[in-house]
Image: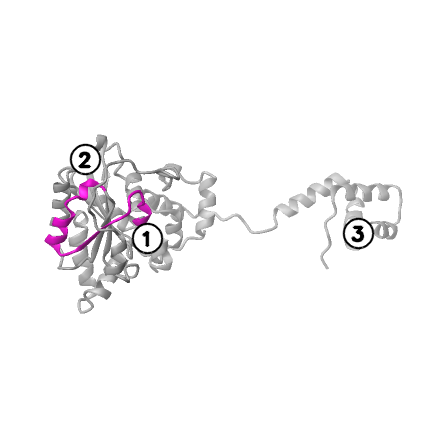
Amino acid sequence: MAHKQFTMDDIILIEKYYLADVTTSRIIEIMGKKQPVYDVINFFKTGKNSKEFWEQRKTKQSRCGRKRLKLSVEEDGHVEHLLRQKWSLDMIANHHKADSTFLAFSMGATTLYRRAREGMFDKHLLPMKGKRKPNGHKEKRGKQAFTRNIAQRKIDHPNVEKEFGHLEGDTIVGLKHKSAVVTFAEPLSKMIFTFKPASRKAKDVGRVITDWLNHLPAHFFKSLTFDCGKEFSNWKDISNANDIDIYFCDPGTPSQRPLNENSNGILRRNGLPKEMDFNKVSETFIQSMSDERNRIPRRSLGFKTPMQVFVEEIHNNLGQAISLASLQKWAERTFCPSAV
């Protein structure tokens, strides 16, 4: 039977009874706990006092419970290497669930994050999040008129949430608003695409999008959804040239393109900051930023990488007659030229 532990006051009281020659049976009657009283009395019979008993009990208690987990030298080096590759601790701890060849860590994600708070890892390597704009923010920049509203997308594509190939698009603006990067995100696979237009002008943005789509099979992607920025004012030319549906979000509602907004924030924090002049970097560098993110596992994808899921979606929807390995090579050449 479990007994409630004596407090320090209880032990001191027992010591006083013991020194006053009160019998053990009487002390048990007063304290109401038989075995704990015997333990204390027997300790006093060795010539020690209540303070020593208390310290001994604390020492024993410190040895109880689960031992603190420690990373092995191999695991510690592996974590640092993957953090430098922009992996989150969640992905590091759980990627073995999707890839049996991946190292299974002795710590779970929660414990790794706890160790991070304790300063075990370099905080500059940890992917951080933050709000871009405060709640209630209203967009005041110029917007184009005569667009095709996103509400029409649900009518044209009733299963848009479950269908592969509906891209969300936007631009990331560089230093002094003089340069830009066109970004796309595919919601089902979380795949990110980045391109460098010659300038922020609508004709250059439209040209880089059209050139990209022209290199893909017809109707590979089903639709594009942009914000209301004027850089997409040539949307009709893009739509006609590539036979693809294009839609626009309601003004001031980036939440209608959630993955693209989130992806842009990730790209901002990992290689494409506002302070960068994109005119001074190469197209290869721009594309390598998205390629890097596409090779990092995501919890929402069952700890697979966006590239893995993207190829699986192509295989399931467009090319089941083609082997998965062949599709993988084609996808590498077509969508990740910076890595080839």
Q: Is residue 237 magenta?
A: yes
Of mark 1 and mark 3, the one earlier in the sequence is 3
Which structural element holds mark 3? helix
Q: Residue furthest front?
A: 146
Q: Nearer the viewer, residue 135 or 8?
A: 135
| Quarter assignment of residue 62 | top right
Q: Residues within 10 Å of mark 1 (few under 14, many from 20)?
A: many
Q: Residue furthest bottom?
A: 321
Q: Is residue 41 magenta?
A: no
Q: Residue at x 74, y 41 (%)?
A: 8
Looking at the picture, how far across and down is residue 194, in whole percent?
A: 21, 45
In the picture of the structure, the residue carrying the numbered disc 2 is 179
- Segment colored magenta: 229-257
Q: Is residue 283 left or right of residue 81?
A: left
Which structural element holds mark 1? loop
In the picture of the structure, the residue carrying the numbered disc 1 is 297
- Rounded to the nearest angstrom, the CA distance separating label 1 from label 2 is 30 Å
- Rounded to the nearest angstrom, the CA distance separating label 3 from label 2 is 82 Å
Looking at the picture, how far across and down is residue 1, in whole percent?
A: 73, 60
In the picture of the structure, the residue carrying the numbered disc 3 is 38
Q: Nearer the viewer, mark 1 or mark 2?
A: 2
Q: Inspect the image, locate mark 2, and give the three-letter code of the amino acid beneath it.
A: Ser
Q: Inspect the image, locate mark 1, and give the three-letter code of the amino acid beneath it.
A: Pro
Q: Residue at x 77, y 41 (%)?
A: 9
Q: Nearer the viewer, residue 154 or 340?
A: 154
Q: Nearer the viewer, mark 3 or mark 2?
A: 2
Looking at the picture, how far across and down is residue 88, in whole percent?
A: 37, 47
Q: Residue at x 41, y 40 (%)?
A: 121
Q: Inspect the image, locate mark 3, and give the three-letter code of the amino acid beneath it.
A: Tyr
Q: Nearer the viewer, residue 99 or 200?
A: 200
One can see residue 285 in this view: no
One can see residue 52 in this view: yes
